Image (cartoon, grey):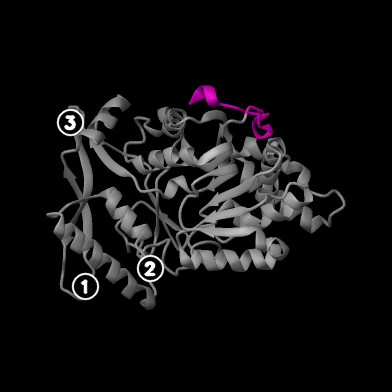
Amino acid sequence: MTPIQVPAEQKADNQVLSDDIRRLIEQKEGWISFEQYMQMALYSPGRGYYSGGLVKLGAAGDFITAPEMGDLFAFSLAAQVAEILDKLEGGALFEFGAGSGALAAGLLNELEALGELPETYLILELSGDLRARQQETIKERAGKHFPRVVWLDALPTQFRGVVIANEVLDAMPVRVFEQHTSGSVMEMGVGISDTGSETEEPVFRWMPREPDPVLASAVQALNLQIDGQAYRSEIAFQALAWIHSLARVLEQGAVLLIDYGFRQAEYYHPDRDQGTLMCHYQHHAHPDPFFKPGLQDITAHVNFTAIALAAERAGFDLAGYATQGAFLLSTGVLDRIPLDAPVKQQLELAQQIKKLTLPHEMGELFKVLALTKNYASALSGFAQQNHLNRL
């Protein structure tokens, strides 16, 4: 990858986390799973990417999510949330990983306008830094609704209402495997290629090992058709477990999962032989997960077929699956441009809509999967498109 300059103040934090990972590898006889590595790189208390103090979102961060572009995403999503809360005759709203708080602020304001303010707005956020930023954003943009917002450290024991997870599944640690034309499978874990001196940052590398029965069985069930070189990809066991945990908590309502990914046939397409891992640092996208752990985001695309199957096994009903573009068009994103607005404002809103809905932007790669429990009504967000039969 192209060399990237890392600020001096970040290097010390990076070295501390790298040393922690190296010690774990040494304790584990020279090998840890990539899932363990990704967990530490992203979520180590105070040092991981999401739990540290780095600016992650927006122009000053590493990437931009849909809520950061403006209010249109939140306003359109609110239409679907309001419909569900109306059918439930009340309930709470529960957001996982609320980022900067922009989505929460936008949803609260629009739900008030729609007459469907939730009884409580719950946010589960593991990062103390992000939690502080969320509080600041909500106070600034939706201050009168701030008393409704409650931050959690863990899942509640029971919940009734709407759950939103926007770009959450992609950040859940994955296990990486490699299958060869002979049919043999190896788990690709992490080892140390050069520990250097005590003052130098360790260098991590991919290291293969025989898979355990769980991973071996999961790869075999994929029935991959390998032709040519070795095939590498991921399985997101943590995301599947999270779905089961969510099913135990939700008594009645809906879950809206918004993320980038594919159905299984596309996820494990023969041409996608290097998997879907992608990293982001200062708006540079690259495939090296071992670059500066703790300072960059590491993601894997979502296998929506696997998520849907896990959801059904956990007791959810599948209510809808569509591209983000189709979902937002169904929830009225085009109606958000006031005809009497100044031309400059209309152009800015039109640019947001293009970015959110066009196939070559976020409209096609990002999908919306809706799960329901004890909720029989159709969801209007899937009026124009519902591809559940393709999963």
Kind of residue indicated by mark 2:
Gly
Q: Residues within 10 Å of mark 2 (few under 14, many from 20)?
A: some
Front residue (pair 175, 292): 175
Residues at badges 1 and 3 in contact (C-beta under 8 Å)? no
The residue depicted at 40 percent of the width and 45 percent of the height is 300
Q: Counting residues from the N terminus, which is met first, the one under dot 1 or under dot 3?
A: 3
Mark nearest the camera among 2 and 1 is 2
Tell me how far mark 1 sits from mark 3, CA to CA: 37 Å
Sequence-earlier tag: 2 or 1 = 2
Secondary structure found at label 3: loop
- Is residue 328 depicted above or below 285 in this figure? above
> Which one is earlier in the sequence, the residue at label 2 or at label 3?
2
For residue 307, which quarter of the picture?
A: top left
Percent coordinates x, y for residue 155 in the rendering = 47, 50
The image quarter containing residue 103 is bottom right
Image spot of residue 55 (x, y percent): 49, 67
Answer whether residue 383 is magenta in the image: yes
Image-based side of 182 in relation to 43, left or right: left
Disc 1 designates what residue? 200
Chain part drawn in magenta:
376-391
Image point (84%, 54%), residue name: 341
Residue 346: percent from left, percent from top: 78, 53
> Which residue matches tag 2?
46
Reading the image, the residue beneath label 3 is 184
- Report the Cα–Cα distance between label 2 and label 3: 39 Å
Q: Residue placed farthest to the front in the image?
A: 157
Q: Residue furthest right?
A: 340
Which mark is nearer the camera, 2 or 3? 2
Q: Secondary structure at mark 1?
A: loop
Q: Indicate yes or no whether the magenta region holds residue 21.
A: no
